Amino acid sequence: MAQTVPLTNLINDLIGDVRDPGLMWQVAAIVLSIFLGWTLSLYLRKRLEQRDSQGVVRFGVESFGRVVGPLAIVCLLAVCEAVLRKWQHVNLIKVALPIFGSLAVIRIAFFLLRRVFARGGEVGKTLLTFEKVFQLLVWLGFALYITGIWDEIFVFLDETVIPIGKHRVSIAAILQGAVSVVVLLILAMWAGAALEERLMNMQTVSSNLRVVFARLGRAVLIVVAVLLSLSLVGIDLTVLSVFGGALGVGLGLGLQKIASNYVSGFIILLDRSLTIGDVITVDKFSGQVTHINTRYTVLMSGDGVESIVPNEMLISSAVQNSSLSNRWVALQSKVSVAYDSDVDQVLRLMEEAAASIERVSKEKKPGGSLQNFGADGLDLAVTFWIQDPENGRGNVTSDVNRAIWKSLKQNGISVPFPQREVRLLGPLPEPLPQK
């Protein structure tokens, strides 16, 4: 651990540097480092904004632009300290180094936390509160480092041991282990998010394969981070065999559904029976597939309601997929006309009205048919095709019906409605006398 300087000695050294003509070299080094660091940060951010590529480099550096400045300043100050200490004192630079180092740590932590827990761009109150607490702890650590109290606190924590079973572990070791576990897990989650975003932008690869690789990549990174953190803490990895046995018992007793949903999720992604964007119906749920997760699939209906369907249901139940092998969907509009109407003319008008709608396919032309001789008129229907069922069916059917109604009205064709004739047999009853 770096050797700290007591506060009294630090103040005396700074006062001594003020009287030294070489102080201007330290001030110039600090100002130049700040200027070059922030200039580099602004340059990188502008260059990345002008690029159209979506590679891993851009993903990592574009959001990392705010962190580059403090890191560059710390590196430049370290170089200046190494150079100037050969000819003069560098106490002022020694104070500036931990200040900008603390700022760099805070910026890096904020960057990682927001990339992992605020990927949609919205930062919740819990995350903001945690960031404020973390920032306070970092500056408190800086104050302890500057005043020289940090060494005393660390020695105290290192000498204070806690009995855990047959072993005795110091508080310092426990804290170091906890910090290493948290840092490695956050780094693994950030790397998984970076990998997922990169894969989801690869349009040449099937959407299902992209999701599979993203999920597997994140799982592998988290497992590696956990194993590495356990090794750093000093925990023997053979204890995982006991955990594996307990997990097997749990799967056998009460976790079958959860395990089944996870396995079903990978089956769906690998066999490509469903892809993001498909319009499906399963049980009483229907809508467009918006997300396929390892445990559940999200369906969004036409009214915006999202249904979370367990993956096991998609494997064990019959699923109606409107866009599995092709996206053609046939829809039908029905209307009744009077018996004295010209059937051929009405069918032609209905076909022309349906073809006039933009979403109706021009390749597969609408076709009309006489379906039934109804009690009130002739029952006619026109069948038309669409190729974008994810945009809704009711809206295009409504447009076709409106076009048919307008065409029939313009050509004087009446649409009958049920009429009933009531006949009274025999003389009318005499009215009751009024009181």
Image (cartoon, rainbow, N blue to C red):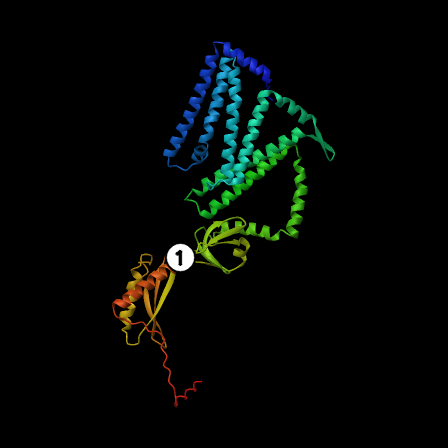
Instruction: Compare residues 208 and 368 and report the one nearer the observer.
Output: 368
* Residue 87 seen anywhere in this rendered image of the structure: no
Label 1 crowd (10 A; few <14 / some 14-19 / many >=20): some
Answer with the quarter of the image where residue 360 lies. Answer: bottom left
In this rendering, is residue 360 above or below 245? below
Instruction: Compare residues 282 and 135 and report the one nearer the observer.
Output: 135
Which kind of residue does numbered mark 1 sit on? Gly
Apparent side of residue 135 relative to residue 166 in the rendered image (left or right): left
Residue at left offset 29%, top offset 60%: 356
How many marks do you count on the picture?
1
Residue at left offset 56%, top offset 15%: 11
x and y percentages locating residue 26 in the rendered image: 48, 15
Answer with the quarter of the image where residue 287 lies. Answer: bottom left
x and y percentages locating residue 117 in the rendered image: 51, 40
In this rendering, is residue 157 above or below 400? above
* Residue 153 seen anywhere in this rendered image of the structure: yes
SS for dot 1 = loop
- Residue at numbered disc 1: 392
x and y percentages locating residue 8 in the rendered image: 59, 16
Residue at left offset 46%, top offset 24%: 72
Instruction: Tell me the quadrant of the picture where the C terminus can be found.
Output: bottom left
Instruction: Tell me the quadrant of the picture where the N terminus can be found.
Output: top right
Outermost residue on the front side: it is 435
Outermost residue on the bottom side: it is 427
x and y percentages locating residue 206 in the rendered image: 44, 47
